[in-house]
Image (tube, coloured by chain):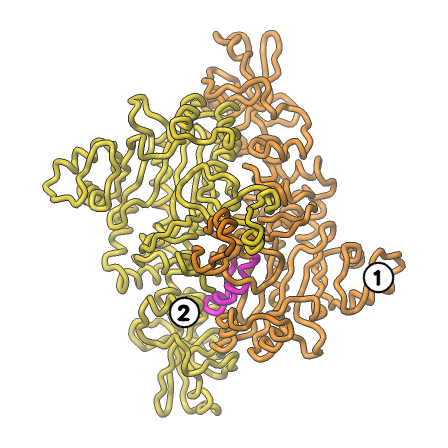
Chain colours: A orange, B yellow
Amino acid sequence: MIDVKDLFKNNYIEKEVTVSGWIRNHRKQKEFGFIDFNDGTYFKNLQIVYDNSLDNFEEIQKLHIGSAITAKGKIIKSEGAGQSIEMKLSSFVLEGDCPEDYPIQPKRHTREFLREQAYLRMRTNLFGAVFRVRSVAAYAIHKFFQDSGYVYFHAPIITASDAEGAGEMFQITTLDLDKVAKNGKVEYDKDFFGKRAALTVSGQLQGETFAMAYKKIYTFGPTFRAENSNTKTHASEFWMIEPEIAFCDLDGDMDIMENMLKYVVKYVLDNCPEEMEFFDKFVENGLLDKLNKLINSHFTRIDHEEVIKILKKADVKWEFQPEFGQDIAKEHEKYITEYFNGPVFIKNWPKDIKAFYMKQNPDGKTVAAVDLEVPGAGELMGGSQREEDYDKLVSRMKELNMNQEELDWYLNLRKFGGCVHSGFGMGFERLLIYLTGVDNIRDVIPYPRTPGNCDF
Amino acid sequence: MIDVKDLFKNNYIEKEVTVSGWIRNHRKQKEFGFIDFNDGTYFKNLQIVYDNSLDNFEEIQKLHIGSAITAKGKIIKSEGAGQSIEMKLSSFVLEGDCPEDYPIQPKRHTREFLREQAYLRMRTNLFGAVFRVRSVAAYAIHKFFQDSGYVYFHAPIITASDAEGAGEMFQITTLDLDKVAKNGKVEYDKDFFGKRAALTVSGQLQGETFAMAYKKIYTFGPTFRAENSNTKTHASEFWMIEPEIAFCDLDGDMDIMENMLKYVVKYVLDNCPEEMEFFDKFVENGLLDKLNKLINSHFTRIDHEEVIKILKKADVKWEFQPEFGQDIAKEHEKYITEYFNGPVFIKNWPKDIKAFYMKQNPDGKTVAAVDLEVPGAGELMGGSQREEDYDKLVSRMKELNMNQEELDWYLNLRKFGGCVHSGFGMGFERLLIYLTGVDNIRDVIPYPRTPGNCDF
């Protein structure tokens, strides 16, 4: 058995080969027929042609869409437009039949319908492409960091700390809830970990402990938010990449963010050309231009304060008025990337709207935080230099009424050979939305979990 | 700033360089001194030498163990035994001091003590090596599958199904347990997903849905067991690799298991030679021999029934009597790998002790399941051909009183172009225990979660 991808990428002309896969479409004529065959290793179908010179011609003509077959035949140059090769069938085995009410027919299905058929939707062009790009992009991220000497760190998923407070958390428990209801009390001492535990919202704090040993580390794993949001960009379970780098300031952090993004985009363009062309044609016109431009663009770096000035000067009727000391809205993000005609790092944000661990700038008002805004997608990554000064970090935690004791280990990193260090986070699905043009997070996660939805 | 690894791997002799990292040890003489310097990019320390010709000699001599410094100096050939290079210090900056009560001193600490200092233990030789090997092995797994055309699939972590029943599950909820206790009832319709949800124990069933689209897929993600076991090999949160391959029978499955394992072992030996030598010397004598032998060995393939015959014939006083139709014990695993002097695939297991989805053999008694036993570690992976026959699968589920409706999507895979397919699972930590010789799972996971333990 050979992969269809090999057939397209190497020369098998006039060679007899065997392939196993599925029938995507079947067009029958009186004396011959065409099967669109796909084995999942390649975006394009292999066209299999047959005619009535075969003994079992009638049997072949009965093959259903969706069936699994093993086909044997000779690879020949295709005369059809846009197809380099096809297979002239000599024999086949029906591995598994498929009924005529098979939901995935060779026609246009809505994405909503396919979401309900999530366990089958990878068999369509669109989702076949999305989840291959997901796989290739994930590998590109690993490859970028491993080739640069980073250590991959598996942050814990179950945590007893809710320190980052990045959103509501899912509680995990082995207590029998029916018994809790019956007994009228919650006995955490009898819970699995002897205390309240939850699903992580970020591996950053633990990531810093690894950066203080290996200098350069990254996480790549699932994170969770129990937020009751039903938007195109929110999911309860999603994958995050969180690099953390010792002896690295905010400028160095931005260098890494920029290099990583360009690398991953280029890797996906190089390794999924068929899929990316498909997205460009059928999902987001101009996608390839957008991505090629990104690879070659200079990323602007500008202070939050300067951004507000530009927004205030702009001849635009804002829905939300830009203000010094405030967050910026989607419309502002859009304006700024258009203003600079490319990706923009907005840095040095007002301290009060950012997390406790970010490096406090000498001005007393801002922190060394950065968001990367990209044309057409808004915020793609966020990072910061971390506060390495023990006293400043403690006083910030006190201001925010945070439990210092729970994070003593995190604070200790500042005592035991601490140093300037920085990191950032990228939501993997956000990257995929940007890479594919598919604009709903439910369509770039294999089995999305959102409020009220936990199927398959 | 340059990585210490670069200094060792390339020629910097007589060149002035700058490095940032941490002081592992500091030996002071009256007129000179030696700093063991490590920046986390390389297993070996860089020795930094200095003498009293430097203006700030006294200041240097005060540098504490654990401190972070940036050091500038010339790389010279080392005259010390076993060291290829060292750095002659010209200047330094103290990035972060470290108090004298720093827990990680240059002496032997027990693993139990270091487990309590999990956020610092990566700074020791042992754990520094363990978690680098963890990172490199993870990458090797990705590289093996990606280079072979597999699609990496992120299985869902939160699930509403407990179909596999592989052990007790953690429940996840956003219900306020105090309110549950107060109100005396559990209202799942008000829970986040509108029903009971839990953490996954395996991504296999969803993995099969992807294999039926891409032919070859693998998962690599966290899985969970709420088992109240306090053993060296049990953790509540661990990472699993679960490949799934369409048009592949049990023999093909074993080929992939064997190839993958040999590839990963070789990759780690090639890319972590210093770490592996350290484990061989200080953790498991003979480790390198064991692993090199594995790479070059032929993996025996034998039926479970034949194994029982061998065990019954053996001149050994068993603690557990080997029996046809029964599972085998640790002592049997050990005997069998010694008997064949290498890794052994035990296949065609009694149906009643294996999972519902395994392919039923024509004998009516066994299933096409396989466990890989390796010398010195016992079971390393388990796999099977999956039952592709809809009716047989349904009747097996009925025998086991399983909820068929909940798994209708899984069953449908057998209707919609199903085919012979197989897969396997490997616990990543089990592999690491085998690779490093470190025999406690708590010591190969960055922040282990076990009953009663959920720190950091």
**Residue where numbered disc 2 is placed:** B117
SS at mark 1 in the image: loop
Answer few, some or many: residues within 10 Å of disc 2's Cα (few below 14, many 20 plus, some between 14 and 19).
Answer: some
| Quadrant of residue A403 within the rendered picture | bottom right
Q: Are marks 2 and 1 in contact (CB under 8 Å)?
A: no
**Residue where numbered disc 1 is placed:** A321
| Quadrant of residue B109 within the rendered picture | bottom left
Three-letter amino acid code of the residue under disc 1: Gln
Q: Nearer the viewer, residue B251 or B404?
A: B404
Give the total of numbered labels.
Answer: 2
Residue B143 horizontal/vertical position (percent): 45, 47
Task: Specify whether A365 is left or right of A254.
Answer: right
Residues shaded magenta: A201-219
Q: Residue A387, relative to residue B153: is it above or below?
A: below
Q: Which of B426 and A456 is in front in this view?
A: A456
Measure the alpha-carbon separation of dots 2 and 1: 49 Å
Q: Residue furthest toward the left?
A: B315
Q: Which residue is drawn at 27% across and 49% down?
A: B377
Q: Residue at x 26, y 38 (%)?
A: B327
Task: Specify whether A398 is left or right of B382.
Answer: right
Q: Residue A122, relative to residue A203: is it above or below?
A: above
Q: Residue A83, relative to residue B182: is it above or below?
A: above
Using the image, name the chain to which the residue with label 2 belongs.
Answer: B
Q: Is residue A238 visible?
A: yes
Pointer 2 and pointer 1 on the same chain: no
Three-letter amino acid code of the residue under disc 2: Gln
Task: Specify whether B54 is left or right of A28.
Answer: left
Q: Nearer the viewer, residue B98 or A54?
A: B98
SS at mark 2 in the image: loop
Residue A339 horizontal/vertical position (percent): 80, 58
Q: Does the magenta stretch include residue A250?
A: no
Q: Which residue is drawn at 38% across and 43% down?
A: B260
